[in-house]
Image (tube, helix red, strand yellow):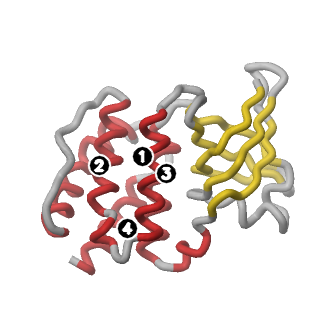
């Protein structure tokens, strides 16, 4: 395997003293897990943040071997992680994507949608500008994985939050039921923060 492409870094888990196992969402290959040497070091620590867009050079000698990746920062979400609401939204979107998507399966629509969602979270003047996009992403994820949900909710923030509450059941039942970590806790935290501005 040899892949050079832009990717959205959706998760990073420490490995050994200084490395990380990164999960990268690419347009052509879907989610790819790769070993990033020095990922916890001073130079790469600001790069290996979920939500960041990176230029990834991913290589492996065989399909059974964990690939090695060299990554360079293209777009950082780091500055937006200092605010609780954008940080919770970015964390939830990346955690959901990591938990729900199988590796090495192409989902170009989800790649593009996640990129657009993260951009909206970071650049919209307020959460009212991206809550609808978040719900649309969750619905698209359910659809792409074969659990077709209804149309994108519309309306003002209170109606969108009601739709968000309704979507919690299919997300938990179909996408996250067999996960060890309580990923829905990240969504509940986001929902609480959104409830304060409604």
Query: Is residue 114 shown left or right of residue 158?
Result: right
CA gap, disc 4 and disc 2:
19 Å
Q: Which residue is mark 4?
A: 189
Q: Which residue is mark 1?
A: 113
CA gap, disc 1 and disc 3:
5 Å
| Front position among marks 1 and 4 | 1
Alpha-carbon neighbours of circle 4 within 10 Å: few (<14), some, or many (≥20)?
some
Query: Is residue 117 shown left or right of residue 151?
Result: right
Q: Along the polypeptide, which appears first: circle 1 or circle 4?
A: 1
Alpha-carbon neighbours of circle 3 within 10 Å: few (<14), some, or many (≥20)?
some
Q: Along the polypeptide, which appears first: circle 2 or circle 3?
A: 3
Q: Which residue is mark 2?
A: 136
Query: Is residue 82 shown left or right of residue 113?
Result: right
In the image, residue 193 above or below residue 96: below
Q: Which residue is mark 3?
A: 115
In the image, residue 196 above or below residue 11: below
Query: Is residue 194 shown left or right of residue 57?
Result: left
Q: Which mark is residue 194?
A: none
CA gap, disc 1 and disc 4:
22 Å
Q: Along the polypeptide, which appears first: circle 2 or circle 1?
A: 1
Disc 2 to disc 1: CB gap under 8 Å: yes
Residue 13 location (% of width, % of height): 68, 51
Kindly state the secondary structure of the residue where label 3 is placed.
helix
Disc 1 to disc 3: CB gap under 8 Å: yes
Q: Along the polypeptide, which appears first: circle 4 or circle 3?
A: 3
| Front position among marks 4 and 2 | 2
Kindly state the secondary structure of the residue where label 2 is placed.
helix
In the picture, the quarter occupied by the C terminus is bottom left
Alpha-carbon neighbours of circle 1 within 10 Å: few (<14), some, or many (≥20)?
some
């Amino acid at each position: 395997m040899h892949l050079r492409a832009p990717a959205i870094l959706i998760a990073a888990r420490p490995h050994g003293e200084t490395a990380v196992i990164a999960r990268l969402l690419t347009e052509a290959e879907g989610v790819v897990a790769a070993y990033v040497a020095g990922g916890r070091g001073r130079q790469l620590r600001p790069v290996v943040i979920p939500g960041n867009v990176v230029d990834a050079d991913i290589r492996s000698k065989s399909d059974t071997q964990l690939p090695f990746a060299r990554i360079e920062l293209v777009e950082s979400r780091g500055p937006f992680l200092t605010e609780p609401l954008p940080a919770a939204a970015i964390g939830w979107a990346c955690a959901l994507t990591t938990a729900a998507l199988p590796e090495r399966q192409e989902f170009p629509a989800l790649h593009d949608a996640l990129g657009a969602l993260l951009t909206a979270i970071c650049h919209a003047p307020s959460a009212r500008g991206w809550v609808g996009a978040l719900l649309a992403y969750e619905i698209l994820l359910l659809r792409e994985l074969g659990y077709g949900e209804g149309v994108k909710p519309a309306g003002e923030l209170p109606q969108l939050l009601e739709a968000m509450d309704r979507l919690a059941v299919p997300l938990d039942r179909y996408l996250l039921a067999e996960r060890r970590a309580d990923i829905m806790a990240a969504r509940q935290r986001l929902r609480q923060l959104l409830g304060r501005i409604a």
